[in-house]
Image (tube, coloured by chain):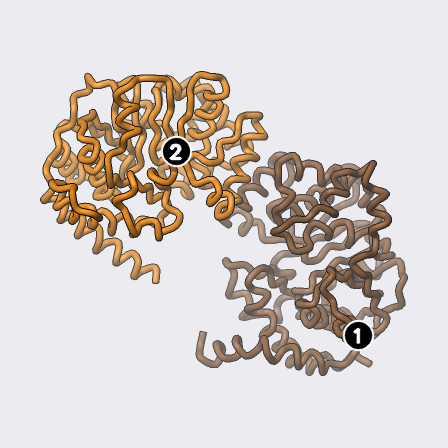
Amino acid sequence: MNVRGWILLHIAPFVFPHVIRFTSPIEASPYPASTGITTKIGHKYVFMYLCMIKSFFFFSGLCPSVCVIDDGTLTRIDKRMLRNHVRNIHIIPKSAGQQEMMGLRQHYPYTYRYHQESHPDLYTHNTCVYDLIQLPAYEKFVVIDADIIFFRPPTEIIRWLTGDDPTMYFMSFPSRYAATALGWGRVILTIFANLWNSRVPPIFNDGIMCGYKSAFAFSRLEQSIKPIYKYGLEHSWISLVLIWSKLFIDISTHTQTPIHQLKSNRYRILTVQSPDTRNSLTKLVCMHYIGIFKDRYFPLDALRVLKKTKLFTSHYL
Amino acid sequence: MKSFRTWLMNVLRSILLFSLRYTPTISVAKSTEDVTLCSLTSHDHLPLYLMCVKSFLFMSRRSLPILAVDDGTLNWEDITLLHRHLPGIRVVRKKDADRLIVPMLTKFHYAKRYRMDLHPAITTHNQKLFDPVLLTNTARCILIDSDVLFFSKPELIIRWIEHPSSKTLLLKYDKAFIEKSNRWGVLVFRILAKLQHTPQAAYYNTGIVCMNRTLFDLRLVEAYCKQYYSYRLAHTWLGDQPIIARLVSLLQSQKQTTISGLPSTLYVVLYQTNIRRNLSVLTCIHYHTEANKIFAFVDSLRLLYVTAFFSNVSKTI
């Protein structure tokens, strides 16, 4: 990296929040709706979220209903900013769904436990599965993480949102990465892939998921969470990957719903093994900045796309 | 950085090899003894292996038969060096080991396959599982890694040598520390144990194993190797350690042996490098990761200096 690149990389985190504030607001379809985009966010990720949703609206040319689930850290200012920047956005408070949760206690004890227990090392992973599917009013949902930036039209998602494709999609790591990456986490995912006789767990990523609420029945959710407790994985983040993987595998097996991975060379996940990917962002549909890359590269790449799109102007209010 | 590290390692290796010239030769006991000190070693680890064996023999003031199995990288100079430093040592070359081991494993398909396959990620862990224990001629053996260094008299091991019993001694990780620092590794061990309904053996390290040879039950080893293949873990870096640790844990539950973990405050598996400040209070250190090898060279030189090249133990390291 040259000196200019190094300086930009270190200045970007300070500049990015100020620049994203000055982008034009967008207007989503009114909530409730049958189709929409859901994201779980906290105070720390508000600016990233605004960048993600605005880049999605800009490149897709769609304006679906949008809903965010507060992880409990959103302030009044954050909520006001979200409402100002994304008109018709629906914000679901952290406390939502508690009443329904209590009702699950008897028949779905593992779902209840996983959601309600405190997991010291987890951020909001344990609440994601239930909240993202059950709390929004959408029957047909797209879950998109806040730490994603779109660089081109996401054709598959556009087609899925506007058509009646029964397929469910998920973001994925390249198979090559899954096969060669070292680490205990990979070993665990490999074990479960073979236990469940599926290729999904080692490649699964929950950055983007397209699915149908009705497919995620409580009984299915319970069956996916149960093995997590059996193997003592409930307090590790890998539990979330395994639960989502198991849900997708079960849905595909028992309901004949096709499940497909979004092409990993276009819907890219930034990993240690692929740092050069950032040199040609415009060839990608989107990039998911996982782990340490979130703070390191997201702001700079967000500024690059903001500059390229002249601050997201053309489709805006 | 990596090349500097390699350069430094090479320099330290050369200095250690040079210094070892001035250490006294230690005659190895004849194989009429009951216990053999068995190791798998390589060209790169040769100075460390010599330090391991010499520091053990020097600190314990005992002579034992010694078996060194070549991992395929030892050359004639290395073997001459071994014979010069340790007259009477039995060195088994890789091709001889292959010739001797294969007939022993003919009835055990997966064990044989695991032993003979190439595993790029684990180098020689598969060979380490079988060769030292199966090629020894004595009823009991001390399996020891090349990267173990002794700083004072290993009382517990000497007591084990002098009092034949069914007890098995193993190095042990500091439980509280390992639960925190290598939580994933502990999880993988637990999952593997749960999958086969065997006792959990998460805290043992195979840097030093004092065991009866009969405990190396090839039927059980076959089952564990089969598990590696059925979960596609054979080529991952899960090596001999999960197998040996689980093997003895299972045998303990069947009351065929009693495991006694060597106290982790004296027989240290190196995780925190600050523990090396005062080596004289420790019995030994297992420098078990590649990152720790540099400390093994440094501490070997410190040990040689303090013992004035193995002739004076009175100074404090």
- Mark 2: which amino acid? Asn
Q: Residue at x 82, y 50 (%)?
A: A166
Task: Depth check: give the residue in front, A195 or A102.
Answer: A102
Task: Depth check: give the residue in front, A97 or B127.
Answer: A97
Q: Locate residue A110: give its quadrant.
A: top right
- Kindly identify which chain the residue marked by label 2 belongs to: B
Q: Position of residue A100 (x, y in %)?
A: 86, 48
Q: Residue at x 69, y 44 (%)?
A: A243
Compared to residue B64, the image places residue A8 above or below, namely: below
Q: Locate residue A194: give its quadrant.
A: top right
Residue under label 2: B126
Viewport quadrant of the C terminus of chain A: bottom right
Task: Depth check: give the residue in front, B273 or B106.
Answer: B273
Q: Residue at x 77, y 60 (%)?
A: A69
Q: Position of residue A90 (x, y in %)?
A: 84, 65
The colour applied to the residues of chain A in this rendering is brown
Identify the disc placed on residue A27.
Answer: none
Q: Residue at x 47, y 17 (%)?
A: B255
Q: Is residue A254 left or right of residue B240?
A: right
Instruction: Find numbered disc 1 in the image and state the secondary structure of the residue it sits on.
Output: helix
Q: Position of residue A208 (x, y in %)?
A: 70, 57
The colour applied to the residues of chain B in this rendering is orange
- Kindly identify which chain the residue marked by label 1 belongs to: A
Residue under label 1: A80
Q: Position of residue A206 (x, y in %)?
A: 68, 54
